[in-house]
Image: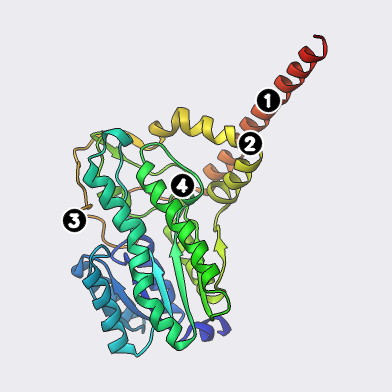
Amino acid sequence: MARREQLSGKIAIVTGASSGVGWQSAVRLAEQGVRLCVTARRREALELLRKQVEASGGECLVVPGDVTVAEDVERVVRECLARYGRIDILVNDAGVQTYGYFDQLPWEHIQRTVDVTCLGFLRFAHAVLPHFRQQGSGHVLNVQSMLSKGAAPLLSVYSASKHATLGWAKALALELHGTGIHVSNVLVPSVSTPMFDHAPTQLDKKPVPVPPTYDVDVVARAVVRCALKPGRTVVPVFLQGKLPLWMNKLAPFVGDFILGRYGVRMQTEDQPLHRPDGNLFQPVPQGVGPYGSVPPTPKWKRLTAVVGLAALAGGMLGGAALGVRGLVGDVSHR
């Protein structure tokens, strides 16, 4: 009950709320007593979310809009203020990704991905920050990605967008030091969202997330934790979160080897699929709600993957050490 009281009555705008992490985060925040203003391009999907929230006793305002359109962003903020009188939390979640080799992506896909996934975050923060400053408090809570600190083949533009957004968020936090306004980030692993069901692909194959895939609710609960204790960067999982960050510091060549050799295969299925534009420029009816067609990976498979990665890393580290010793020995005999 104490946790709920900390957030009860707070006002939150949630972007990208028509599906996936945005939808589920809105549901979890409403359970904590947060009053919502939800936005995305698809009004019908947002109305379904509103009904779910209100059926559980929550309050939810629906304001459709496109994060790439400044007038839409300003309207969402204006209508939220008109309804509730203030804004306490901005949950930046809207994002798109497009699958393909960088040099084979249409340039308009590159621009659109950056515009939504990076500049959409900046537009909303730019619109709400004057209100945060006026009231002396507020929270910009960004749903980021593990690709904010890494990379994956076929997702070069999405990776670039997330790197840029995390860098912006860190700089923003420094600028807001001492103002009472906080900035938080949640680094999301592969999750069972509908993003993969409406993302465009240039490969004519069905795109899938890099395994393992986590339940979308794992991220939604992390969003709630950040709302309760703002000002942090949270990594909510181990195998596709804390472990690769740790390995990237100690043995970056392990991840590079795996994704360089198997990354494309990991992210595609043999099932033919012609979806060159997906939901980039126009919303699509598929993929409403928190879950997509790719289910979460069972826990036992995730544990097996940990053991396999540990063995691979150990073998590669051992090989690297032997190579260094051999080089040193060769030099010492010259």
- Of the numbered discs 3 and 1, the one sitting upstream in the chain is 3
Mark 4 secondary-structure assignment: loop
Quarter of the image where one finds residue 125? bottom left
Residue 58 visible, this orientation: yes
Q: What residue type is labelled 4?
A: Thr
- Location of mark 1 (residue): 320
Mark 3 secondary-structure assignment: loop
Residue 212: % across, % down: 47, 44
In this picture, is 62 found above or below 205?
below
**Label 2 neighbour load within 10 Å: few <14, some 14-19, many 20+:** some
- CA gap, disc 3 and disc 4: 26 Å
**Label 1 neighbour load within 10 Å: few <14, some 14-19, many 20+:** few
Q: What residue type is labelled 2?
A: Ala
- CA gap, disc 3 and disc 1: 49 Å
- CA gap, disc 2 and disc 3: 41 Å
**Label 3 neighbour load within 10 Å: few <14, some 14-19, many 20+:** some
- Location of mark 4 (residue): 297
Tell us which disc is closer to us: 1 or 4: 1
- Location of mark 3 (residue): 284
Residue 191 visible, this orientation: no
- Location of mark 2 (residue): 251
